[in-house]
Amino acid sequence: MDGVSGLTQDVVQPEETFDYDFTVPDAGTYWYHAHNRSFEQVGRGLYGALIVEEAEPLDIDREEVLILDDWLIDPETAQIKDDFGAPHDLSHAGRIGNLLTTNGTFNLGLSARKNERLRLRLINAANARNFQLGLEGLDGWAVALDGMPLAAPIKVTEPMILAPAQRIDLIVDVVADVGETAHILQFGREEAFSQVTFEVVEWGSKNRRDAPLALPPNDHRMVDLSEATMLSLSMEGGAMGRMRSASLGGELKPIGEIVEAGYFWSFNGKVDGINGDPLARLDRGQNVRLKIVNDTAFPHAMHLHGIHFHEVAENGTLGPLRDTTLLERGQTREIAFVADNPGQWLLHCHMLSHAASGMMTKIVVG
Ligand SMILES: [Cu+2]
């Protein structure tokens, strides 16, 4: 039920239907989207939020699901530019839009009450943009990343980077006064813009609540690094990259032929994507440590289907559970996980133009 056409199911043809039928073991903020020609279908808005609630309600006044996106609009026609798959997007930073929206609206306006406590579920549905977010007039704590609860809430003091496909759950208290506006800010190159506006229209409660508690943890088996199988993934290619050749269909080909075939990036020297050999075949329950090397001039948001992983810090400590990790240009990151979910799981860049042009592989679990 993972919805990956060409791997776990056929595409759903026009006028056809397909029933997705699955249980949801983990509470959290998820989303769903087309996985066929994603760079165009997601770019045109074929996605939605999938929210799994906790068994017990939280101590909040209300929640808002906020889906962030950017759209590439032709300024002459005000229509979505239809140059999906443009070689420049494929080979550079991906398709970056020029109209930033929340739930499809530019500068979404909501109302709020002073001292009100909100849960905000932020989802980045953009093709390639890394949102860089801040709070103004809101006191906030991160309580979950990519759907998975943090062990303890983390006070928001610095800009939060939300890469494509990533989610962050915030608990925020409205601290702006009645008559003022609070904001979720998006930091541009030089200045900050309001991404979402909260107009404080009246008092909620007279007093603020105590700091929030952690969300109840989801069931999760802890990875054992001492038992872990080491895997590695080298990401190459793109503009200003060093890729001179790559393997396509089992044959090593010079860069000219690779580009001719529509590929600009390689994983471990291959561009075969889901049709090629898997990165690894794992036994169910196997502990894995995967080193990802971003040997390119662009950031990439690496997303693993089916399994949450930890980012491993250089000193070997495990970071919070995630399903998408952002690698800046030239960065190396280790992730670790227990392969406890059987299936064929894509591992790909969630900058969708990159996934379409070589940045895709799969992991097969027992
Ligand atoms: Cu990428």
Image: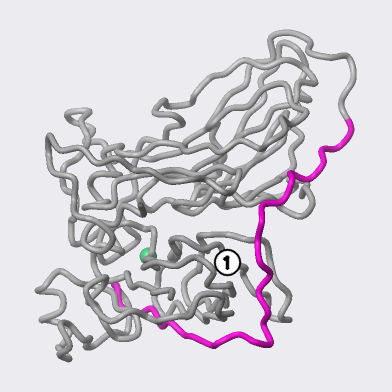
Q: How many marks?
A: 1
Q: Which residue is drawn at 58% across and 59% down?
A: 322
Query: Looking at the rendering, which quadrant does residue 65 occupy?
Result: top right
Tell me which segment is drawn in magenta: 210-239
In the picture, measured across the screen, residue 125 lies left or right of residue 158, that is left
Residue 278: percent from left, percent from top: 33, 79
Seen from this angle, which residue lies furthest bottom?
Answer: 252
Image quadrant where residue 193 sits = top right
Picture quadrant of ligand 1: bottom left
**Residue denoted by label 1:** 309
- The x, y position of residue 181, in whole percent, is 66, 20
Instruction: Please tell me whether residue 58 is drawn above or below residue 36 in the rendered image.
Output: above
Residue lying at 53% horizontally and 37% vertically, measured from the top left: 51
Q: Does the magenta stretch include residue 342?
A: no
* In-front residue for pair 205/136: 205
Residue at 84% x, 14% y is 205
Does the magenta portion include 220? Answer: yes
| Camera-side residue of 303 and 71 | 303
Q: Which amino acid does label 1 sit on?
A: Phe
Per the image, label 1 sits on a secondary structure element best described as strand
- Picture coordinates of residue 134, whole percent (x, y): 64, 41
As drawn, the residue found furthest toward the top would be: 202
Q: Which of 176 and 247 is in front in this view?
A: 247
Chief secondary structure of the magenta portion? loop
Q: For residue 120, what is the image quadrant?
A: top right
41 vs 307, left or right, is left
Q: Looking at the image, which residue is at 27% across and 51% down? A: 38
Does residue 201 lie above or below 365 as drawn?
above
Q: State the colouring used for the structure image.
A: one colour
